[in-house]
Amino acid sequence: MGFSLNFGPLAPYWPVFLTGAWLTLKMTTVAIVVGVSAGTLIAFLKRGSNRFVSKACSAYIEAVRNTPFLVQIFLLYFGLASLGIHMPTFAAAVLAMIINIAAYAAEIIRAGLESVPKGQIEAAECLGLSRWRIAWHVMLQPSIERVYPALTSQFLLMMQASAMASQISAEELTAIANTVQSDTFRSLETYIVVAFMYLALSILVKLLAWGFGEYLFKRRRVIRRAALEMARRRPPAIPPFQATVATAAANTTNTNGSAS
């Protein structure tokens, strides 16, 4: 019995697919903005002098990083409901994503903060800069620039992990796919379409992250412009064959001149 791909039955569902993709992108954007902000604060608190707060931040990071994301969603949605706190599926999914990405971002940013030389911090203190200026200009900006590729990878992983929200009936892309394939009985075609839509969303997130990085890290643009300017001013290199001919001609001239 042969099988052939038929995407025709999926055509009427394109608006539904786009709605699910938009909800996935919206969930990811909110989770990234709030989660990274919270993760930055947690990274500074973990490095702080208060041992109790530092230990609490470490416990939070380890608890989140060592439990499955699906379990975290279930704890928020079903666990809070058993206590009488009922949350909409969108809010529960986004809150779980924020809690998850905050823990991973905190550890990534903490590693970046640890890479800042202590001499730079001491020099800033000697110049009389306030703690806020030291934390922002001397510590946070250089560390974020160093770990930005790792953060970007975490953004992509969080966007893909948003598919877990379909388990609590959040109408994101994977939940839409489950509904469409149950209506059309074209499972393979449905998930091929969803795979390409996730690929497009991943490329979009990468481009947005790259553009934001180019805007945020001005030093990169300055270094790139300086490298291009030096490349323009550098004299063109002589090809190896022409260089050999020129050297041979110079040696011949010197030999003739010495012989005469």
Image (cartoon, rainbow, N blue to C red):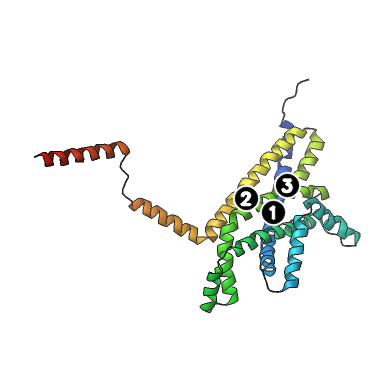
CA neighbours of label 3 inside 10 A, class few (<14), some (14 to 19), many (20+): many
- Residue 50 visible in the snapshot: yes
Amino acid type, mark 3 = Gly
The quadrant holding residue 134 is: bottom right
Residue 200 location in percent, x, y? 63, 43
Image position of 234 with respect to 180: above or below? below
- Residue 95 visible in the snapshot: no
Give the residue at the far top of this rendering.
1
Q: CA distance from mark 3 to mark 1?
A: 12 Å
CA neighbours of label 2 inside 10 A, class few (<14), some (14 to 19), many (20+): many
Question: What number is the disc on residue 20?
Answer: 3
Residue at 78% x, 39% y is 180
Task: Pick whichever of labels 1 and 2 is earlier in the sequence.
Answer: 1
Question: What number is the disc on residue 163?
Answer: none
Q: Quadrant of the N terminus?
A: top right
Amino acid type, mark 2 = Val
